[in-house]
Image (cartoon, grey):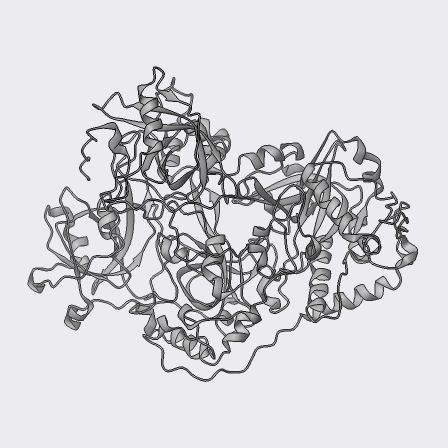
């Protein structure tokens, strides 16, 4: 356990000291806080508010509030909540301040972050009544200064990191999850020691299992680490434990394998040093019964014996454990320590593997998505087990409701991102769902064109629901990830399949592979199941049905980068195609979705300093076990699947005979007609109307051009594609709605971008989470995210869903994902029993492919096939599955992911 640090002798000591020569000016911050401390109400509202720089935003576990009257059931207890400390700089001094809990939402929704400029409008001073002469400033009112670049904070003298300001916590947590190590207390890596190993005094794991009950003290153990889990934080508001962390390891000797648990303050000291393959000498440890509910990795050696009844416990007391790391060059063969073995598979082998199969993979990254967060759900196993024991009769009927309350109020999140990697054995990539594995430096640095190794991955597939569904791999509790720069010395470098992969990369053209790389944007996996019945039974369902009018509350409750999937019931009433390539800027000040000034990857200059060398895929960090470079091999050429080509031909044929398709009697005014009469004007007006939540104007209205000439609306006789469709019902009710929500905006962060190695740091920063501490770079770039070429095509669809009571409606977006340079990269398979979304995806893919060759421009693919699919749903009640994600500030994307018909068997009984 860590010893508590000394209390600050003076309230002003909560600030960060400046370096010598850095504090010559009077500090405005210090003056304001002194004024608050001297005021009768211990608060101050400064008249002048110069802009301040946010240096750091740090999070820690809040203390438990005063105990309320005992609830009827302990399962309804409030989940842990958190406090935030904010470090501000005024140009001459840095001051650490507590953020009033009423302002926590500014951090949770991405409004207040490191590097921001803000003005302090109100502050107070708080004393801790349980400590002598201790107080701290508290921020109660701040205003963000928009458009002003952050100032470089004053340099500070190196000093031990102070504990959090409020309460008795001794360390900060990572800002966005609880699993990653954060702060100076976490040692990077301990150097190996020269230790004399007396083999005659050693015991084995097999002997421990037979004799542990009859012993108090145990002989030393010499073991090798075979598996390593992510960190587990188990802090509770009512507990005063300083470092409540735990990590599991699987260690082995010649007799077999056993679990080892690293507890509490030993985690910051040793967790980063205990790697897979590390040899440890353990002395003064404890043996306990094994925890029955913990996860178990799949060993690379299926013949190795597992001792599952007991586990090794390492702690700072009872007894104080002594740990030594043995350098690999000192390990002797006669010790009989097993080698680390893996279960690598190739992409061609994946299709034949069963669900939940454990494997390891290596591949070249072609796509990496943004980091997102998923709210943790449910109780821990211990809590649930205890509740069932004590309140079994009560919980038998109400356990789902109680856990649901916990889900909605939790502030704990998982971090995850999606990636694609290829290994040359299949045209299809590995699709990887990568959760944070307590390796933040690696997790945040995954980018295209790096060699990615993921261990202990689990196969996710469901052949019972949809045999053609996408197969992907997800991380387990014991997964480890490695990228270029981390491979040297890792045990897997000796694996045969790893060597085969490296040999394949030497035959590939780097330029060809770069054309296929994509980063960031919306990524709709895992896809909802084809059956709504199965959707309702899914463990990942956060709610079954939400009213359209409740969507505002759902969006308001989202935290920064939180992804959530909800279901609404309604009627598909209108569809509009929006061409992003011509949208420049809207009057509300929102960033443009896409500009025509996009920089193509083909014209980018790749420098050797960035670690990419022309000719092949070999990178300098991997040369530790790669041979000399080989000449580039043949280039790859991808074509559309025959299914897509068939759809294209079918669509073209149908467009030539549009008159045979029944359409509503009202007219359509298409963008192709508008383009002849001030196209940009009308596109701009449409875009602004969405933002201001104004009713959509009647599509039968005639719009005069700049010269006063009325454009002729397009009817079924014109035989061309149209950019909008609406039902007769929508024309009748759209002006009589009680509420009309507009959530169809597609933000720049939603668009997958072509990867640019020259600006890889900027792109990674864009799609990673905001950092807790501001780190100004010597060289900054003014390049905007819109300047990177879109990888998903020309536009998207706005879909209007009318409520089943015809009184509310919502506009949502549908974004077809398709990369013309690599059809396997972002292509989503056709959606079974979802004709409308499937048509929009297929037609858009064909149009984008054609446009990429320069043979078709400014087409708006609301084809007759799409209109027919929409008319088939006209007036029918459907369930729409929506993916919503908070992008920071006030930006929330809402995408349509799936449409279910409510006539599906058993749906009504279930809902």
Task: Tell whether 304 sits left or right of 194.
Answer: right
User: Is residue 616 toward the left or the right of residue 699 in the image?
Assistant: left
Relative image position of residue 790 (x, y in whole percent)? 61, 60
Q: Tell me where residue 779 sits by quadrant.
A: bottom left
What is the quadrant of the N terminus in the image? top left
**Numbered marks: total:** 0
- Residue 13 lies, in percent from the top left, at 24, 33
Q: Quadrant of residue 253?
A: bottom left
Q: Is residue 263 left or right of residue 388?
A: left
Coordinates of residue 294 in the picture (x, y in percent): 34, 48
Can residue 764 be seen in the rendering of this structure? yes
Say which of 303 and 747 sits in front: 747
Q: Is residue 326 above or below residue 52?
A: below
Picture coordinates of residue 421, whole percent (x, y): 49, 66
Q: In which quadrant will I find the C terminus?
A: top right
In the current view of this chain or complex, which residue is farthest to the top? 40
Residue 356 visible here:
no
Give the side of residue 791 with respect to residue 328, left or right.
right
Q: Residue furthest front?
A: 25
568 in relation to 252, above or below: above
Residue located at (69% from left, 63% from top)? 845
The answer to whether 488 is drawn above or below residue 132 in the figure is below
Q: In this rendered view, identify the residue nearer to me: 417 or 485.
A: 485
In the rendered image, which quarter is residue 884 located in?
top right
- In the picture as drawn, the residue positioned furthest to the bottom comes out as 631
């Amino acid at each position: 356990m860590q010893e508590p640090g000394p209390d600050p002798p003076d309230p002003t000591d909560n600030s960060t000291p400046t370096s010598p020569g850095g504090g010559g000016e009077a500090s405005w911050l210090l003056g304001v806080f002194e004024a608050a401390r001297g005021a009768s109400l211990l608060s101050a509202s400064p008249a002048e508010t110069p802009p301040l720089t946010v240096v750091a935003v740090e999070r820690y576990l809040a203390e438990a509030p005063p105990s309320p009257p005992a609830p009827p059931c302990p399962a309804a207890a409030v989940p842990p909540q958190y406090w935030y400390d904010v470090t501000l700089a005024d140009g001459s001094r840095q001051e650490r301040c507590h953020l009033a809990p009423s302002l926590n939402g500014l951090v949770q929704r991405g409004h207040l972050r490191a590097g921001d400029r803000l003005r302090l409008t109100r502050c107070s001073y708080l004393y801790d009544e349980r400590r002598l002469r201790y107080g701290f400033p508290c921020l109660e009112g701040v205003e963000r200064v928009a458009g002003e670049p952050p100032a470089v904070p004053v340099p500070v003298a190196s000093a031990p990191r102070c504990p959090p300001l409020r309460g008795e916590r001794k360390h900060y947590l990572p800002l966005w999850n609880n699993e990653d190590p954060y702060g100076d207390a976490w040692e990077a890596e301990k150097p190996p020691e020269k230790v004399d190993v007396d083999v005659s005094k050693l015991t084995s794991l097999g002997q421990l299992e037979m004799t542990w009950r009859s012993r108090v003290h145990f002989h030393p153990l010499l073991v090798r680490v075979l598996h390593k889990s992510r960190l587990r934080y188990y802090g509770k508001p009512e507990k005063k434990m300083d470092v409540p962390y735990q990590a599991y390891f699987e260690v082995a000797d010649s007799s077999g394998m056993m679990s080892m648990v690293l507890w509490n303050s030993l985690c910051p000291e040793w967790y980063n040093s205990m790697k897979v393959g590390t040899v440890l000498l353990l002395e003064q440890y404890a043996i306990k019964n094994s925890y029955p509910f913990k996860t178990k990795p799949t060993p690379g050696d299926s013949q190795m014996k597992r001792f599952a009844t007991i586990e090794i416990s390492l702690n700072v007391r009872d007894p104080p454990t002594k740990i030594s790391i043995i350098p690999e060059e000192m390990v002797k063969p006669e010790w009989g320590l097993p080698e680390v073995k893996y279960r690598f598979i190739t992409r061609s082998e994946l299709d034949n593997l069963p669900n939940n199969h454990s494997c390891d993979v290596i591949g070249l990254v072609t796509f990496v998505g943004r980091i997102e967060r998923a709210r943790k759900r449910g109780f821990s196993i211990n809590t649930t087990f205890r509740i069932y024991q004590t309140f079994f009769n009560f919980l038998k009927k109400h356990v789902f409701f109680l856990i649901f309350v916990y889900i909605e109020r939790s502030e704990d999140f998982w971090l995850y991102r999606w990636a694609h990697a290829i290994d040359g054995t299949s045209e299809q990539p590995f699709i990887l769902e990568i959760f944070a594995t307590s390796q933040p430096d690696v997790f945040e640095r995954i980018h295209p064109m790096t060699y990615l190794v993921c261990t202990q991955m689990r196969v996710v597939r469901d052949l019972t629901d949809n045999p053609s569904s996408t197969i992907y791999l997800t991380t387990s509790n014991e997964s480890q990830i490695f990228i270029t720069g981390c491979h040297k010395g890792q045990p897997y470098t000796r694996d045969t399949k790893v060597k085969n992969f490296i040999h394949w990369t030497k035959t590939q053209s780097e330029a060809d592979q770069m054309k296929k790389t994509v980063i960031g944007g919306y990524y709709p996996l895992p896809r909802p199941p084809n059956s709504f019945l199965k959707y309702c039974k899914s463990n990942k369902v956060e709610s079954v049905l939400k009213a359209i009018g409740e969507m505002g509350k759902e969006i308001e409750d989202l935290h920064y980068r939180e992804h959530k999937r909800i279901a609404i019931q309604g009627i598909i009433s209108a569809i509009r195609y929006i061409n992003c390539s011509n949208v420049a800027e809207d009057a509300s000040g929102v960033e443009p979705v896409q500009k025509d000034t996009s920089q193509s990857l083909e014209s980018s200059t790749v420098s050797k300093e960035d670690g990419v060398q022309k000719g092949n895929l070999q990178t300098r960090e991997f040369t530790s076990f790669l041979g000399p470079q080989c000449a580039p091999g043949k280039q790859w050429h991808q074509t559309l699947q025959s299914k897509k080509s068939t759809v294209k031909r079918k669509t073209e044929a149908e467009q030539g005979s549009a008159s045979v398709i029944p359409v509503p009697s009202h007219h359509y005014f298409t963008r192709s007609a508008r383009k002849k009469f001030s196209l940009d004007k009308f596109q701009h007006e449409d875009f602004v109307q969405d933002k201001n939540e104004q009713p959509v104007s009647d599509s039968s209205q005639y719009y005069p051009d700049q010269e006063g000439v009325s454009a002729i609306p397009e009817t079924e006789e014109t035989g061309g594609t149209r950019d909008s469709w609406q039902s007769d019902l929508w024309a009748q009710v759209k002006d009589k709605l009680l509420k009309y929500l507009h959530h169809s905006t597609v933000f720049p962060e939603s668009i997958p971008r072509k990867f640019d190695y020259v600006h890889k740091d900027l792109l990674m920063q864009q799609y990673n989470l905001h950092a807790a501490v501001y780190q100004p770079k010597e060289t900054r770039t003014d390049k905007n995210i819109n300047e990177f070429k879109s990888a998903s095509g020309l536009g998207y669809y706005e879909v209007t869903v009318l409520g089943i009571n015809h009184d509310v409606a919502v506009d949502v977006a549908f974004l077809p994902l398709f990369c013309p340079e690599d059809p396997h990269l972002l292509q989503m398979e056709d959606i079974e029993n979802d004709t409308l979304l499937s048509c929009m995806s297929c037609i858009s893919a064909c149009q984008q492919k054609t446009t990429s060759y320069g043979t078709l421009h400014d087409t708006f693919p609301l084809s007759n096939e799409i209109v027919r699919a929409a008319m088939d749903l006209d007036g029918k009640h459907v369930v729409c599955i929506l993916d919503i994600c908070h992008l920071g500030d006030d930006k929330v994307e809402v995408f349509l992911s799936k449409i279910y018909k409510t006539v599906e068997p058993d749906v009504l009984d279930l809902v």
